[in-house]
Image (spheres, rainbow, N blue to C red):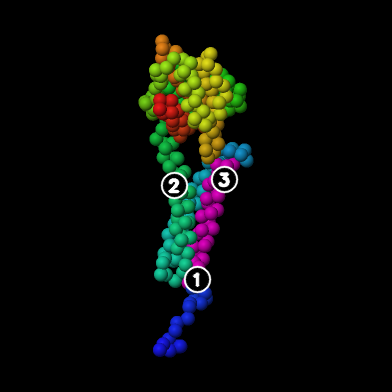
């Protein structure tokens, strides 16, 4: 028989490893950094502050992300499995948040340095489609509505040599409906759709900071076919970080798909 003294009692909660204070502190800091990064974009989107302030807040969040990542490594060592303290999972979560808080702005900065410093992209740089219905919406926009000439065109040709007009094997009426369907599929806010003039105008808004960008699509009949040109232009900012070119490519993929 087993002696009563040999029966081991279940461990008391008081014998459990104490939680690592540094793991808890770093997790709290990581949450603050994450919220700061989110607010950097929500501020301009909701009108609490302008995008320049948002960029500055995002920069602070990125530096905070570096600090969180470094402290998270220390917390991982302190709260490692089998160690004297708990909190390993919290340290892992903190490390992930820190890396994201730094990595996302760094990735955007890397993209910005790899694309032309322009914000007006079109498939026809010699005779770009003109904004008409959208013009009143851009009345107070820092970026002028007019195309800014050969220097912009040269940079686009060097940076985005793949952007060309689209030739649809469709008559004008069918091509216009297809172009409109593709624009609606992008989730854009359609401002005007004028089949008589072969023009579609729309507005799109970026996900994070909520920047407004405007799009105009021009359709030109050529015998039984139709040439489609697209132009996408930001209302603010010197560089669009490639957003307008990506928007045009996405639209062309839907149009030709």
Q: Position of residue 68 (x, y in %)?
A: 48, 55
Q: Is residue 23 visible?
A: yes
Q: Which residues are magenta?
A: 17-43
Q: Is residue 57 visible?
A: no
Residue holding disc 1: 18
- Residue at the top extreme? 223
Crowd class of label 3 (few under 14; some 14 to 19; many from 20; radius 10 Å) = many
Q: Which mark is residue 39?
A: 3
**Could you tell me which residue is drawn at 52 percent across and 35 percent down?**
206
User: In the image shown, does 71 or 170 lie closer to the viewer?
Assistant: 170
Q: Which mark is residue 139?
A: none
- First along the sequence among labels 3 and 2: 3
Task: State which quadrant residue 203 falls in.
Answer: top right
Q: Is residue 185 magenta?
A: no
Residue holding disc 2: 103
Image height check: is 95 above or below 209? below
Distance of label 1 from label 2 (alpha carbons): 32 Å
From the viewer's perspective, is the residue at label 1 or at label 3 nearer? 1
């Amino acid at each position: 028989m087993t002696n009563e003294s040999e029966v081991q009692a279940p461990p008391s909660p008081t014998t459990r490893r104490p939680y690592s204070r540094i793991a808890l502190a770093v997790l709290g800091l990581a949450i603050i950094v994450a919220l700061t990064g989110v607010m950097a974009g929500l501020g301009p989107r909701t009108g609490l502050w302008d995008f320049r302030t948002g960029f500055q807040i995002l920069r602070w969040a990125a530096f905070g992300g570096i600090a969180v990542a470094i402290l998270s490594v220390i917390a991982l060592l302190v709260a490692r499995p089998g160690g004297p303290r708990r909190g390993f999972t919290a340290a892992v979560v903190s490390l992930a948040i820190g890396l994201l808080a730094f990595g996302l702005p760094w990735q955007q900065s890397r993209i910005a340095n790899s694309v032309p410093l322009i914000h007006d992209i079109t498939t026809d740089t010699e005779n770009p489609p003109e904004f008409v219905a959208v013009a009143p919406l851009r009345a107070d926009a820092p970026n002028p509505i007019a195309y800014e000439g050969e220097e912009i065109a040269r940079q686009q040709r060097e940076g985005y040599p793949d952007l060309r007009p689209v030739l649809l094997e469709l008559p004008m009426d069918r091509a216009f409906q297809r172009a409109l369907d593709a624009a609606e599929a992008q989730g854009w806010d359609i401002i005007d759709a004028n089949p008589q003039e072969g023009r579609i105008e729309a507005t799109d808004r970026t996900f994070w900071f909520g920047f407004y960008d405007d799009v105009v699509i021009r359709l030109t009949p050529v015998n039984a076919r139709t040439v489609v040109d697209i132009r996408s232009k930001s209302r603010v900012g010197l560089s669009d970080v490639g957003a307008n070119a990506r928007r045009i490519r996405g639209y062309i993929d839907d149009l030709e798909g």
